[in-house]
Structure formats: structure tokens, C-alpha cells
Image (cartoon, rainbow, N blue to C red):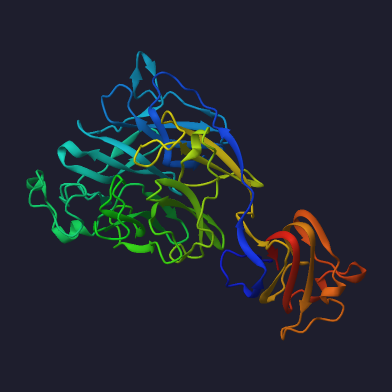
Amino acid sequence: MSRRVFFYDERELDACHGLHLAYGPVTKLGLIDWPRPEWELEQASVFVGSLIAMPGGGWRLYYSGRCPTKERTFGLAVAESADGVRWEKPALGQVEIGGEDTNRIVFGNEPEFGSFTQEQVVLMPDGQWLMWSWWHAHDHGYARYVRAQSADGIHWTLDDLNRPAVMHPSDCELGQNAWVVGLTAASAEDKFAHQRTMDWMAAKRLRSNDATSVYYNEALRQFEMYSVWLMPCDPGSYRYTPHDNAPRVLRTIQRRTSTDGIEWSDPEMLILADEHDPMHQEFYYLSVEPLGEWNVGMLGHYRCWEQTMDLELCFSRDRREWTRPLRGGWVPRGSVEEIDYWSIYSTNRLLDMGDRWRVIYRGGNSKHNHQLPEGVAEEKQETFVAEAPKGRFAGLSTTHRAIGAMTLKRFNHTAEQITVDADVRGRLQAELRDPYGRPLEGFELNSSTPITGDSQSHVLTWSGGKTSAEYRYDVVGLRIEVEDGVVYSVET
């Protein structure tokens, strides 16, 4: 079986110069097409919403927003689509507004106070549906991530609200009075202290911000959670941002696992700002798309001082060690006249459209603290869709006026012939080498047939049209030189 080599880290390369990793092409398709009835949730948001590939085909989207009737702060809803662009909002028979049935979800045993938002839904291999969502009942001392179950993904029953997966610092069990007293002890002045039932250390272990994603790893038979760990930020720190909505914390990414989706492991720190990041870099969420050998992460890239939110791609082989070679927005934000001018937030996964990926995202034109940037007259947010060709999240691009070269680490050549996914405006040539780095006779660089054009399967050939087929199942090396182009991957 052949193997495709991507360049998201440097593990596959012996040498590389005159090339740098750059994002591949992204096409913005504009607003998603869905009904906008009067009873629709206000500020409907797909951020940390859930996309489910339905067994019979098509997609189901779980999203949230603010209740227009004000009976609750937030509400949950459902939409369905065949292509990720055109969506319908099915009547679910659970909530009527103005005599009209809606697409709203209400738990069968929903408490009389509080509301739910940012639902994460998992369809299990046995057909059971599970949901995690943030229960916000701040007036009663609760801000926690709780689980529900369903037989059809439409009618849901909450599990025990006193067994949260994680909790916000303002929950009564943590008692940290929002952001006022830091993150190291419960506040003695918290008005809900009398409601605490947990040991302080047991509660402290479950700290999290919202913006949480949950998945089921069928191969490992475990649930995986990616959420935000909050670290204290002293006002005297060079990282302090006084105009942020939570200036006393720094947002980083944590991971937890669970065998049952109820009891979760200790937090494992995944992504923190480092010396290669801007001074006020923070991370708002992490959504994960498994793609065989690699996992692609959609990382909330939050420039805290500027108050911008971008969708950064990061990469991991094991979902624990993540590489961030690009450190900027994958889907470009719009101009000042466009709604997605200042922020982009993704859902929990990508839509598989065969030869391309589609991403559903929430775009907005205001700063994270809801202040308006210069040139923006009114705060707006909408739901958009963009797409990118498969295999082209990022590639090695040539430096201007330079010839780039890479040497792959030696590999067992298992493909029928070596092919390259590349967009070459100038030329690309290759040299096949023996295990000791010496050019194989007839396969020298100067014998390589120059390649030009844009293809995901350029076949490497040499004089006489011969391919690398005679060296199949041999250990070989490969050097590639490219002028004015991008190399996304090599099938070896």
C-alpha cells in the first residue's frame, strides 16, 4: 500500500531550503442558504456547534443562539443539509412560537432555570446519541458542562446535572466569582458557597472555560475532549490586556479522555503560546478532524490585544503533540465592508464533499469585547461556508526568485510510481537515489522530465518516459527541485 507524505512537520525531510510552508487555496462560498423565520434564534451561532454525517446521507447541524422570546437566555436548534450550503430547519414538535412549530430542542427533563448552549453531539457506533452542552444558570450558581442521551438525536434526556464533565470557574463548586479572585482558591465571599458538595481539589481538577469539543475515538474506544484551560494573568504581566472581557486569565488548550463520557481524566496541556507567537496570543478552542495518519486541528487563534479571532490549522499524528507551522488564519477574513471582517469561528468538524472539504463558520465584524473596529457602523454576525481541495491544507512554497529543494528521508517505495501533488508555474524536477544518497543511473536530476502545471498526481518520469516502477519495494531516496511552485505532498 502506498503512502502519501505531507510536510506539516519536518519528520519526513532530510533537508529543505528555499521552501516555506504556506496555506493551500481556500474558496469562500458566502453565506449559507437557510430559512430565516421570525422565531429563529437571535445571533444564531455554529461556533462549537456539531456536524453529524447522517447514516442515510447528508448532514445534521446542531447550533445555538439567544432565545427571541426571552424565556431562556440560550436555545438549541437543528438544521439539515445535503451539501453544506443549502439547509432546512425541520419542525421538531418541541417548541411552538406564535403558533408555529420550530426546529428548537428542549430536554425532556430540562430544569426550570438556566439555559443550554454550545452543544457537542456524538453518534455512537451502536446508534446511541450523546450530547454535551454548557448549562448556564449563573443566577443559581451553576456554569457546567453536562451530558444528555437520545435514541434519535432529536428527543433528549439530561443525565445527572451534579456530575458535570467540567465546570466554569464561576460555578458554585469552584466559587471563583467569575474572574475576580484568580484561579487558585475559592472565594470566601461567593454567595453560592453553601451549595458546594464537592471537595475543593476534586472541583479544581474540572476547571475549564466554555468552547469545548467532544469526539468518540472508535479505534481507542474512548471519548476525547478539547477545551480551554485558564491560567492566571497578573495585571503587572506583559501579557495583560485590560480591554479584554477576561483580562485576568490566559486561554490555553487542554485535552481529557474518558471511557464512558461521564468520568474524565486529568487535564493534559496541549497548546500554549510560545516564543514564536505574538506577545498577546491566546487560544480559544480546538476542533479536530482525523485524517488517517494525520489529525487536522482547527484552532481558535485569538490575538487578545487586537481582539481578532482567526481559524488557524495545526497538525498532530497522535492528537497529543501538535505542530503549528503556519500561525495565522486559514480562511481569510473579509474586508471592512464584509461581515466576517474581524472574526472567524469554526464548527467541530469539516464536511467531506468527495474531492474537497467544506467548513462552516461564524463570521463577525466586531471585536471580541463587542467594540466596533474603525469603519464598522453596526455589529453583525452570520454563518458562512468555504471549501478547500483535499490534500491541500498546506504545502511547501518556493521563495520569490529562488529555486527550492527538498530531500526526503529514505523510504520503502511501495507505490506503483512516485507522484507529486503540486501547482508548478515554473518547473519541477526530481532525482531518485539509492539508500546511500547516490543518484541512481538514469534517474539523475538532469534526466528528469520537467513538470509544469497544477495537478494532484504529477507522475515523476525520466529520460525515455521511464518511471520509478522498477524500484518498487526498494529503499530509495528522493530529491525534488522546484521553481515557482507549491508542493503539497508526495505519494511514495
Q: Tell me the quarter of the picture where residue 150 sits.
A: top left
Q: Could you say which quadrant of the image residue 417 lies in?
A: bottom right
User: Depth check: 454 or 134 in front?
Assistant: 454
User: In the image as oriented, which residue stretches furthest toward the right?
Assistant: 464
Q: Quadrant of the C terminus?
A: bottom right
Residue 251: x, y in percent?
33, 55
Instruction: Look at 86% across and 70% down and name the residue there.
Output: 462
Residue 123 in view (yes/no): no
**What residue do we see at 26% from left, 40% from top?**
135
Q: Quadrant of the N terminus?
A: bottom right
Observer-nearest residue: 181 or 127? Answer: 181
**Residue 5 at what x, y percent from top left?**
64, 66
- Picture residue at 28% right of the left edge, 48% below the top: 246
Residue 232: image location, x then y, percent: 25, 58
Q: Nearer the viewer, residue 64 or 472?
A: 64
Above or below, comparing residue 183 to residue 45 in the picture: below
* Residue found farthest to the front: 374
In depth, the one of 115 and 446 nearer the eye is: 446
Q: Please state the horizontal and vertical placement of residue 402, each as a whole percent of the image.
A: 72, 66
Q: Is residue 198 above or below residue 191?
A: below
Residue 392 appears in the figure: yes
Asked if 170 appears above or below 317 in the picture, the reply is above
Q: Is residue 352 left or right of residue 369?
A: right
Where is 376 relative to 401, above or below? Answer: above
For the point 26% across and 28% down, the residue is 72
